[in-house]
Each structure stands twice: as C-alpha cells, then as structure tokens.
Image: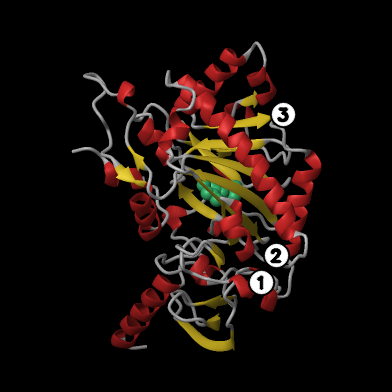
Amino acid sequence: MNAEWEDKLQEDFMQNKKWLPDLWLSAGGIVSSSSSPTWHLAISIGLSPVPLITMAASSTSELLLTDIATQDITCIPSNYIRPISDRPNLLDVEFSNAQIPLVDLQDLLGPDRSRVVEAIGLACQNGGFFQVKNHGIPEAMIDDVLRVSKEFFQLPVSERLKNYSDDPMKTTRLSTSFNVRTEKVRSWRDYLRLHCYPLEHFVHEWPSNPGTFRQIVSDYCKKVRDVALQILEAMSESLGLEQNYISKALGSHAQHMAINYYPPCPQPELTYGLPAHKDPNVITLLLQDDVPGLQVLKDANWVAVDSSRYNLVINVGDQIQALSNGKYKSVLHRAVVNDSSPRISIPTFYCPSPDAVIRPAESLVGEEHPPLYRSFTYAEYYDKFWSQGLNSASCLDVFRAR
Ligand code: OGA
Ligand code: NI
C-alpha cells in the first residue's frame, strides 16, 4: 500500500470514527447515523487501523424508541452513543439509600409537625432530594396508574403516534429522548407529557386509549396535587415564611406530568435514559415502578435511589432555588437504563402558572444575602429551559442578578 493511500484510509477511518465512536469495538453491529434516519450495517475490514465501509441494510421510519428497541438489537444505534467523556460509569455509583432521607408525611398532621418541617428543610438545603411515605395516595391507585401507563406504551404504534409531537410547547404530546429538535445525541426514553392543572382544561386532549386512562390518571393527578401543596406549605414554614408564601408566589399554579418509558437497552453503559439535569419547575414528585434507574449527585458522587413504588421521591426544582434565594438547591439527577427490564417513572412537575413572577423572597434577601436572581416570569424560564437542551449547566444561571 502506498503512503498516500494509507493516509487516505487513516483519514477516512478517523472521520468514520467521529460518527461511530465505538463501532470498531463492535464490528458488524447495526447502527444508524445521527445525520440520517437510514439504518446501516457497518462492517469493518482489514487490519487495524481499519476503514469502515457502511452499506444500507434496511431503513427505518421509527419515530419512537420503543419501536426500535423491540427489534431484537444487540448494539444501540450510534445516535444514542454518548462520547466517552459523558457516559454513566455504572460501576462507579453508590447504593446507599440512607443518603436520601425518608419523611413520614402523616407526622405533618400531628404534634410532630415542626420536627418534620425541619427534616424537610434540611433535606432541601443539603441534598435537594427526599422520599415521602404515608402521603395519602392509595396503593391501589399507584398500581392502577403504573398499569395503565404500561398498557399505553404497549399499544400498537399507530395508536401511540396519534399523540406524537416534537413541539415542547404542546400541552399533550408523546415524544422521545428529550428534545429531538435541539439535541445531538438521543436518550433512551419515550415519554408522554400531559398538562394536568386545571384538569378540565386538558383532560379532553389526553389519550382515550386505554379506555380507563383518563379516569385513572385524573384521579392520581388530584391526589398528587394535594401532596404537592402540603409539601410546599412545609417548605414555606421551614424557610421561615408564611405557610402559604410559596403557593401565593405561583400565580394560579400549574401541574405537568411525564410518563417516562425506558425500554431495556442492550448497551446501558453507552447511553442515558435522561442525562444529568436539574428540574425547571417548583418541586417534582416522582412515582416509579420497582425497577431502579434514578441517580442523584451527592458530594460529587452519583447515588442510586431505591425504587419503591409506594414512596414518592421529591426534589427541589429551579423555582424553589430562586424563591429561596439559593438556600434550597435544585440538584443534578439522571436516569440510567438497564439491559433486562423496561422501566416506568411518572414525575409530577408542580409549576407556577406561566404569568407568575418569580423572585427571591424579600425576607431571605439582606446585606449578607444579596438577591442571587433577577425576577422573571415562569413563561420566560420555561421557554429558555426547552430551547437550551438538557445539560449540567443550570438554566438558572441565565437569570442571575447582575
Ligand atoms: C425527569 C426525571 C427521573 C426518572 O423526568 O425529570 O428526572 O427516574 N426523571 O425517570
Ligand atoms: Ni428530572
């Protein structure tokens, strides 16, 4: 081989490797390029370094991950592969659930209220995450919501696609990954997003199949809203504010929900269900089935959160960080996937209404605590969040006071 030809091969190889970062370790895998929806069968030939010859095997028009993941694949498509510097390092995760405090909400109603309020305050200040039990949502209702959600994702593709949209501003939509309009690498997730407060404004848009979906999910939305309001009262108190301070700061309130479906993934070490992010809303109340996947950043380590379907996992979102002038922290978290079981998680995102003006509470601002954020409307914040894409840089940084 002459030197020029060898250089050319080397160059081709590097170019291919840019698109197909791991492929030469898994020669013969089926991949698809992130720039085109066509599937390729990649075959590597020759001795190392090897050029890659790609040829079309079959094409896919699959919009949803569920319909890719159910084809018996052993390698993930290349547009799901994260760069080496941004992979989950699954062996480097702590499994100590003691890191995520468990709060008994029943005690909020009794003589121990001030102790529970304090525990919630400490959790919000330290790790930004806690779990709650005895929250008043019946176990049978939780089972029903998880069951009907699973049934939804098992519907024929034509039925699911009735709700498909990649427009983040739609109030009811089925989509995939995070935001396919802005992201370069996809995440291993499909999701149904529903606005759910006031219910009567939105419920008619929701899927009508399965036939019990609207009823079961509406009942759950009302119950989980009661829990959110209780927790917001406790948080207000724990900040030394009037019990209804946060509620009043949220305008006419809003509530969104996602039903996340993470199919089994043949190479969970190369991708995420959801990469590290902070939630843009006020608080998130997460219901999950019994399959683990949620991880929280604590003292620079990723900690796996136990998945117990009957406890809700609560976390502080960006709006509480702003309202509390940085005292309570919106913390990075992520979802990882596994190669054996599908996972369903159902976060409720409690939100301000779009017109609500969010600003640090006056009593938490002083000489020693200058305002960290300027005031903004939630509509402004929400737009920014969805246009930025999920990344570890907090969207709140854009709203810092100057
Ligand atoms: C989210 C989220 C975690 C999970 O949807 O914002 O963080 O475990 N989900 O699905
Ligand atoms: Ni989240």
Q: Position of residue 398 (x, y in %)?
A: 28, 47
Q: Secondary structure at mark 2?
A: helix
The kind of residue tagged 1 is: Arg
Q: Nearer the viewer, residue 308 or 74?
A: 308
Q: Quadrant of the C terminus?
A: top left
Label 1 with label 2: CB-CB less than 8 Å: yes
User: Callout 1: 10 Å neighbours few (<14), some, many (20+)?
Assistant: some
Q: Position of residue 163 (x, y in %)?
A: 60, 70
- Identify the residue position indicated by label 2 in the image: 153
- Quick check: 107 left or right of 87? right
Q: Quadrant of the N terminus?
A: bottom left
- Identify the residue position indicated by label 3 in the image: 134
Query: Please, is residue 300 above or below residue 339 in the view?
Result: above
Q: Secondary structure at mark 3?
A: loop
- Select label 3 or label 2 by which is in front: 3
- Quick check: 380 left or right of 229? left
Q: Nearer the viewer, residue 234 or 119?
A: 234
> Disc 1 to disc 2, how far (Cα)?
7 Å
- Identify the residue position indicated by label 1 in the image: 160
